[in-house]
């Protein structure tokens, strides 16, 4: 029996490219030096990709806790939003590389190793976000990979925002980092609440 390959919608990727292009255009218009332009691009591409990530991270929990057409749509389409996050964050990586090249500097070893592992996870999750990979890896192994990856990426984001929040001289007002860290922890709380709800439901079913 012939199987039909799933066709990925293009609009999430065009949306990412449009937003990143707007960030680049706005940065070029607002700043004069290459360093300032690239710093602005790296900051706002990071925040944009984080917003997509938080949406993906919380989508399943939102559908479980607050079922509605919107939350079910988010859960149903999280593969595509996950891939759009990967695209946005790799564009952010290009901006980081361009900034360090412009500065003539190298990031420290902790940043290279910690951030590099996050990008390896993102690449692995993006490469396996298809039905063929689920079949080849097996549902359990596929889920382990994606769970490990998504929680590691979450931890990297939180480490970055909490580090700036604790800094004596953050690059921007602290409320920005408090807001982003708060979003990350709120998404985690939703996942925990959804897991507890599932556990209670299983216990009641078994009783």
Image (spheres, rainbow, N blue to C red):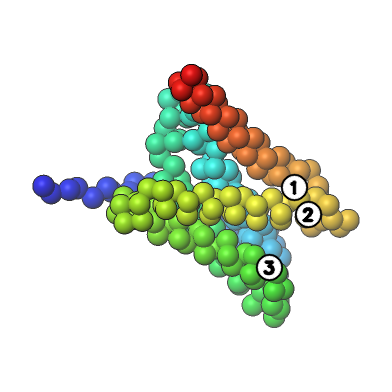
Place of residue 56 in the rendered image (x, y in percent of width and height, measured from the top left): 51, 43
Q: Is residue 125 positioned above or below 103 on the image?
A: above
Place of residue 172 in the rendered image (x, y in percent of width and height, measured from the top left): 78, 53
The residue identified by callout 3 is 111
Judged from the image, the secondary structure of the residue bearing numbered disc 2 is helix
Which residue is pictured at 47% across the width and 62% down the height? 123
Place of residue 102 in the rendered image (x, y in percent of width and height, measured from the top left): 66, 76
Which residue is pictured at 71% across the width and 40% down the height? 182
The residue identified by callout 1 is 177
From the viewer's side, name the closer residue of 51 and 11.
51
Measured in 3D between alpha carbons, the distance from the residue under mark 3 to the one under mark 2, in whole angstroms, is: 14 Å
Measured in 3D between alpha carbons, the distance from the residue under mark 1 to the one under mark 3, in whole angstroms, is: 19 Å
Mark 3–mark 2 contact, CB under 8 Å?
A: no
| Circle on res. 164 | 2
Drawn side of residue 142 relative to residue 159, left or right: left
Q: Is residue 86 positioned above or below 68 on the image?
A: below
Quarter-of-image position of residue 37: bottom right
Which residue is pictured at 40% across the width and 59% down the height? 127
Mark 2–mark 1 contact, CB under 8 Å?
A: yes
Q: Is residue 48 positioned above or below 76 on the image?
A: below
From the viewer's side, name the closer residue of 45 and 73.
73
């Amino acid at each position: 029996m012939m199987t039909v390959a799933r066709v990925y919608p293009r609009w999430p990727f065009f949306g990412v490219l449009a937003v990143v292009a707007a960030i680049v255009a706005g940065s070029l218009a607002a700043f004069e030096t290459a360093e300032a332009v690239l710093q602005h691009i790296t900051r706002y591409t990071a925040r944009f990709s984080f917003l997509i990530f938080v949406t993906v991270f919380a989508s399943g929990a939102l559908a479980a806790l607050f079922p509605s057409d919107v939350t079910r749509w988010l859960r149903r389409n999280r593969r595509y939003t996950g891939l759009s996050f990967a695209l946005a964050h790799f564009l952010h990586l290009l901006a980081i590389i361009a900034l360090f090249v412009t500065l003539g500097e190298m990031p420290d070893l902790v940043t290279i190793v910690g951030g590099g592992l996050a990008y390896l996870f993102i690449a692995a999750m993006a490469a396996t976000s298809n039905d063929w990979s689920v079949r080849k890896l097996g549902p359990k192994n596929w889920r382990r990979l994606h769970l490990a990856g998504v929680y590691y990426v979450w931890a990297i984001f939180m480490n970055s925002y909490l580090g700036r929040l604790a800094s004596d001289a953050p690059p921007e007002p602290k409320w920005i980092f408090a807001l982003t860290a708060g979003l990350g922890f709120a998404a985690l709380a939703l996942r925990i609440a959804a897991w507890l709800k599932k556990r209670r439901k299983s216990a009641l079913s078994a009783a």
